[in-house]
């Protein structure tokens, strides 16, 4: 007999639209029907007796334990894949995470597509899928500015190390997404939204775009003050109003990029995070504060290990470079290609050949009609996707240029390690 968790896990592999049937078996589609991170904001809103339109709520078997909460503490752990976390739990039987999970439950759900932080976080902050909010990748072509930007730094892709350069050219981050973020929508319905994030992110274009309408934004420096601030802010949530605390933790993602998700550093980081949550947050919360409070912990995506010899740098492949009219965009593992007229077949053939069949190429139409982005793309975003989308199998990546620091761990694609994330719910 399979447990409910095993059933929920197996079901994620069944969601495959007709147009994508031929894709490899380890590819997992975003489950926008109620088993993806895109359904979390609407569910949190409804638990707090507010309305956040746009996506169906989480399936009832997931959100059952959420009902009746008046305060929600939401923690996003960037880059923690479900399969990697499951392995961590097996290999670390003494970890605090086991005691945290005993107090609640864990369900596997999917990320959005492409499975990357800017897409997923914008979905979390707006309750809308990528097709609706228009943030489709780490690299995004903005026709009105004539440039592919980095959507974390809001700077042209080649401006390494610079931040918020697009603002100088007239981009207004608060208006970049054509919908109100959760702080504005819930704030108007009497729900207080507070934010805890890395101090260096406060004031960035991406952060301003997401946290508009927030009641209070607090920054942390390291794990210790993250955990202490999480407890203090939870204790300070108003007793007379429904409230939501949104906390964000980036280092698992940063470390996975640098060391790869298989590294022992991953385990070390997660052991420390589990201890911090258990010792500085959960065990020190006062009984009064625990009442009616729900803790939700989720990740935006996982990671896969990338091999240097399986990284295709477009500018080092003249045949490929010559067939493209623009730099590639989105992700190294889910790459959109702007191909010169009549040369699509040549590009497909080249990528198939050079990767030994490990890079699957689908058409723009296939990507859109299969619902990968969570809906049709409105006309104002139609140039944010090229005419092909290349989906890399495990170990493979496509880059436009050689980066200063090659990344060992990557994400963005449809591999199960990137797409499936843990959703942990604990009634405090
Ligand atoms: Zn990342």
Image (cartoon, grey):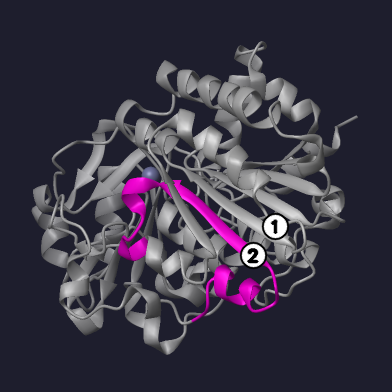
Other residues around mark 1 within 10 Å, as few (<14) / some (14–19) / many (≥20): some
Q: Quadrant of residue 277?
A: top right
Q: Is mark 2 within 8 Å of ligand 1?
A: no
Instruction: Report the residue at 38% width, 87% height from top.
Output: 380
Which secondary structure, mark 1?
Answer: loop
Distance from disc 1 to disc 2, alpha carbons, whole Å, reads 8 Å
Left or right of residue 257, residue 162 in this image:
left
Q: Nearer the viewer, residue 364 or 4?
A: 4
Q: Nearer the viewer, residue 267 or 103?
A: 103
Other residues around mark 2 within 10 Å, as few (<14) / some (14–19) / many (≥20): many
Single out the mark in the foreground, 1 or 2.
Answer: 1
Q: Is residue 248 above or below residue 363?
A: above
Quadrant of the picture in which ligand 1 is shown: top left
Does residue 157 appear anywhere in the picture?
yes
Instruction: Report the residue at 82% width, 54% height from top.
Output: 69
Q: Is residue 130 above or below residue 216?
A: below
Write down the residue under mark 2. Answer: 192
Mark drawn on residue 238: 1
Q: Is residue 338 above or below residue 355?
A: below
Q: Is mark 1 within 8 Å of ligand 1?
A: no
Which span of residues is magenta-colored?
179-206
Asked if the residues shown at circle 1 and circle 2 are in contact, with their CB atoms under 8 angstroms apart, the answer is yes
In magenta segment, residue 192: yes
Image quarter (top left, top right, bottom left or bottom right) of the C terminus? top right
Instruction: Report the residue at 26% width, 71% height from top.
Output: 141
In magenta segment, residue 156: no
Q: Position of residue 421 (x, y in %)?
A: 60, 42
């Amino acid at each position: 007999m399979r447990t409910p968790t095993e059933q929920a896990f197996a079901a994620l592999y069944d969601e495959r639209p007709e147009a994508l049937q031929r894709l490899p078996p380890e590819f997992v589609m975003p489950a926008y029907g109620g088993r993806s991170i895109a359904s979390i904001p609407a569910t949190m809103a409804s638990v707090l007796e507010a309305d956040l339109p746009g996506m169906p709520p989480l399936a009832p078997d997931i959100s059952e334990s959420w009902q009746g909460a008046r305060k929600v503490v939401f923690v996003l752990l960037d880059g923690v894949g479900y399969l990697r976390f499951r392995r961590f739990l097996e290999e670390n039987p003494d970890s605090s995470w086991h005691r945290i999970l005993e107090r609640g439950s864990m369900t596997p759900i999917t990320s959005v597509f492409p499975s990357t932080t800017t897409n997923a976080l914008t979905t979390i902050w707006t309750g809308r899928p990528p097709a609706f909010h228009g943030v489709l990748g780490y690299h995004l072509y903005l026709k009105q500015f004539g440039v592919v930007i980095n959507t974390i730094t809001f700077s042209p892709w080649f401006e390494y190390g610079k931040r918020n350069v697009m603002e100088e050219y007239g981009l207004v981050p608060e208006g970049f997404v054509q919908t109100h973020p959760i702080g504005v929508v819930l704030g108007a319905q009497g729900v207080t939204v507070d934010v805890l994030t890395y101090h260096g992110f406060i004031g960035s274009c991406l952060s301003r775009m997401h946290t508009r309408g927030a009641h209070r934004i607090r920054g942390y420096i390291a794990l210790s003050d993250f955990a202490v601030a999480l407890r203090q802010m939870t204790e300070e949530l108003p007793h007379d109003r429904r409230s939501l605390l949104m906390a964000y933790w980036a280092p698992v993602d940063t470390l996975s990029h640098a060391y790869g998700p298989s590294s022992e550093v991953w385990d070390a980081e997660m052991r420390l995070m589990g201890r911090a949550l258990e010792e500085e947050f959960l065990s020190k919360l006062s009984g009064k504060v625990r009442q009616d409070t729900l803790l939700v912990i989720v990740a935006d995506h996982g990671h896969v290990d990338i091999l240097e010899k399986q990284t295709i740098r477009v500018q080092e492949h003249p045949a490929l470079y010559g067939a493209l009219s623009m730099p590639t965009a989105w992700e190294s593992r889910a790459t959109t290609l702007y191909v010169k007229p009549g040369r699509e077949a040549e590009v497909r053939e080249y990528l198939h050949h050079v990767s030994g069949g490990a890079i699957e190429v689908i058409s723009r139409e296939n990507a859109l009609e299969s619902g990968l982005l969570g809906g049709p793309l409105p006309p104002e975003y139609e140039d944010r996707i090229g005419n092909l989308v290349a989906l890399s199998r495990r170990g493979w990546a496509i880059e436009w240029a050689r980066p200063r620091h090659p990344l060992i761990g990557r994400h963005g694609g449809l591999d199960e390690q990137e797409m499936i994330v843990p959703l942990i719910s604990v009634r405090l």
